Amino acid sequence: METKTHCDWDSKTEEEKLAFVDEVIKDYNYNENNLIQILHMAQAAYGYLPVELQKHIAKKMKLPLAKVSGVVSFYALFSTEKKGEYVVKVCLGTACYVRGGKKIIARMKEILGIDVGETSEDGKYSLEITRCIGACGLAPAMAINDEVFMQVKVDKLLDILEDLE
Ligand code: FES
């Protein structure tokens, strides 16, 4: 199966995304045991798993909606809400926590005007907490989409965000 990147999906229509999800379900033989993989692929296409999409998947797989939404709500990596263009994940693993991760979170909340778990009104930023992103030696660390920032300084956060534009 062809691998899609985030950018590829941005240019696709709803119909194309739905057709892709249907194809994935078919490739996985409509099998309930493959539900997690199917949801992964659906989230890759849509960026999140809205209830309407969960209903569609449940119908196609002949499963009760409760089964699908149960899996979605059980796993933290699935999201039912649309994320921002930039997903800021501040690490609060042990090393980062000790070296100022909480201050980074506090400043990020101030700059973005949102709380952890929220997305800014303009749809630009989501703020999340994450556990160890493998940069403990250069803590505190955070990631914005796929880019990891290390030895992050609170007074440099604004510059980092401005450089994203
Ligand atoms: S604890 Fe933050 S990168 Fe490991």
Image (tube, rainbow, N blue to C red):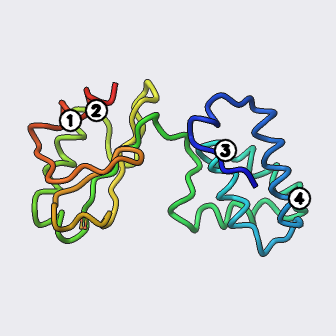
Q: Mark 4, residues whose alpha carbon is within 10 Å: few (<14), some, or many (≥20)?
A: some
Work out whether 40 lies above or below 84: below
Q: Nearer the N terminus, badge 4 or badge 2?
A: 4
Three-letter code for the amino acid on which mark 2 is drawn: Gly
Picture quarter with the C terminus? top left
Residue 113 tag number: 2
Instruction: Specify whether 8 is left or right of 98.
Output: right
Label 3 sits on a secondary structure element that is: helix
Q: Nearer the N terminus, badge 4 or badge 3?
A: 4
Q: Which of the 4 image quadrants contains residue 162?
A: top left
Label 2 sits on a secondary structure element that is: loop
Q: Residue at x 28, y 53 (%)?
A: 90
Measure the C-alpha gap from mark 2 to mark 1.
5 Å
Q: Nearer the viewer, mark 3 or mark 2?
A: 3
Measure the C-alpha gap from mark 1 to mark 3.
31 Å
Residue 110 tag number: 1
Measure the C-alpha gap from mark 4 to mark 2.
42 Å
Label 4 sits on a secondary structure element that is: helix
Q: In this rendered view, identify the residue nearer to me: 85 or 66.
A: 85
Q: Mark 3, residues whose alpha carbon is within 10 Å: few (<14), some, or many (≥20)?
A: many
Indicate the position of residue 8 as horizontal and vertical percent values. 63, 36
Q: Name the residue tied to disc 3.
A: 45
Three-letter code for the amino acid on which mark 3 is drawn: Ala
Q: Are marks 4 and 2 in contact (CB under 8 Å)?
A: no
Measure the C-alpha gap from mark 3 to mark 2.
28 Å
Label 1 sits on a secondary structure element that is: helix
Residue farthest bottom in this picture: 33
Q: Residue at x 18, y 63 (%)?
A: 96
Q: Residue at x 56, y 41 (%)?
A: 6
Q: Name the residue tied to disc 4.
A: 26
Measure the C-alpha gap from mark 4 to mark 1.
46 Å
